[in-house]
């Protein structure tokens, strides 16, 4: 007896978690978001090189205190909003590359959403390459998101020095100040694990198709 293999389809009358209309809407939204954010990133890059630009800059290793507050209140700040008429070329390049890497991580997520919506629309989620694509998007998200934060922090720290916002003793330089966000790395790791789940789901689907 010859085994036949046919794609597994939802049973007639069963309710889909994501309808075909929802999938199409998700595809449109993810594509539109990718285009809009790319345009915003390009505009931001031009603004950094042409100036003036307003940036949040770190002000030192330790929080700076505010005095003279009423009601016995105390406060401190760790950054300032500074408007710079013309950003030096090296720092502008770091900020621009940071924007490119941030956009790359966003495009990885948007592209993944588009792919999953396309697969759901065709009732064929667990394809041969889906797991690899999900895992690759996770690696890109983790690497690009982390690198973007490093470049951005390096540029802002240097700019804070150049405008004299960092308080330091003579012959001392503040090399790097950053609040590192581990969310991109964690999200990328989750996507890599999800890619492994897709590979496992693909094997289960093939086994199920072989029994039909």
Image: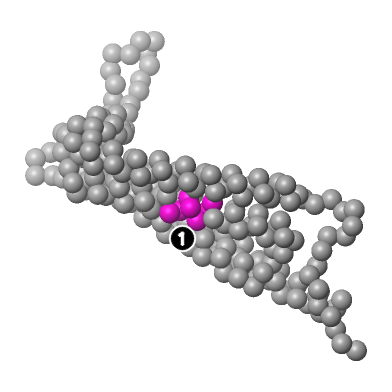
Q: Is residue 57 above or below residue 32?
A: above
Q: Is residue 152 left or right of residue 143?
A: left
Residue situated in front as seen by the camera: 15 or 138: 15
Give the image location of residue 126, x and y in percent: 69, 67
Q: Is residue 173 left or right of residue 143?
A: left
Magenta residues?
104-110
Q: Residue furthest top?
A: 70
Give the image location of residue 205, x and y in percent: 76, 71
Label count reads 1
In this figure, which residue is indicated by the disc labeled 1? Answer: 140
Q: Residue furthest bottom?
A: 1
Quarter that holds the C terminus: bottom right
The residue lying at 17 percent from left, 42 percent from top is 88
Give neighbour class at mark 1: few <14, some 14-19, many 20+ (Cα, 10 Å).
Answer: many
Tell me if I can see residue 36 in this picture. yes
Magenta-drawn stretch, dominant element (helix, strand or loop): helix
């Amino acid at each position: 007896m010859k085994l036949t293999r046919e794609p597994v389809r939802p049973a007639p009358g069963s309710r889909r978690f994501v309808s075909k209309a929802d999938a199409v809407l998700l595809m449109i939204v993810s594509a539109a978001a990718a285009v809009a954010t790319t345009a915003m990133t390009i505009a931001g890059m031009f603004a950094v090189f042409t100036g003036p630009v307003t940036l949040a800059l770190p002000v030192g290793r330790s929080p700076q205190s505010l005095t003279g507050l009423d009601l016995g209140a105390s406060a401190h700040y760790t950054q300032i909003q500074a408007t710079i008429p013309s950003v030096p070329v090296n720092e502008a390049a770091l900020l621009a590359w940071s924007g490119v890497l941030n956009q790359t991580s966003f495009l990885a997520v948007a592209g993944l959403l588009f792919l999953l919506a396309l697969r759901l629309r065709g009732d064929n989620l667990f394809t041969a390459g889906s797991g690899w694509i999900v895992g690759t998007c996770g690696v890109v998200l983790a690497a690009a998101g982390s690198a973007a934060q490093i470049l951005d922090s390096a540029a802002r720290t240097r700019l804070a020095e150049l405008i004299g916002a960092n308080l330091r003793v003579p012959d001392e330089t503040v090399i790097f100040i950053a609040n590192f966000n581990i969310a991109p790395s964690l999200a990328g790791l989750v996507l890599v694990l999800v890619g492994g789940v897709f590979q496992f789901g693909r094997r289960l689907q093939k086994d199920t198709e072989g029994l039909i």
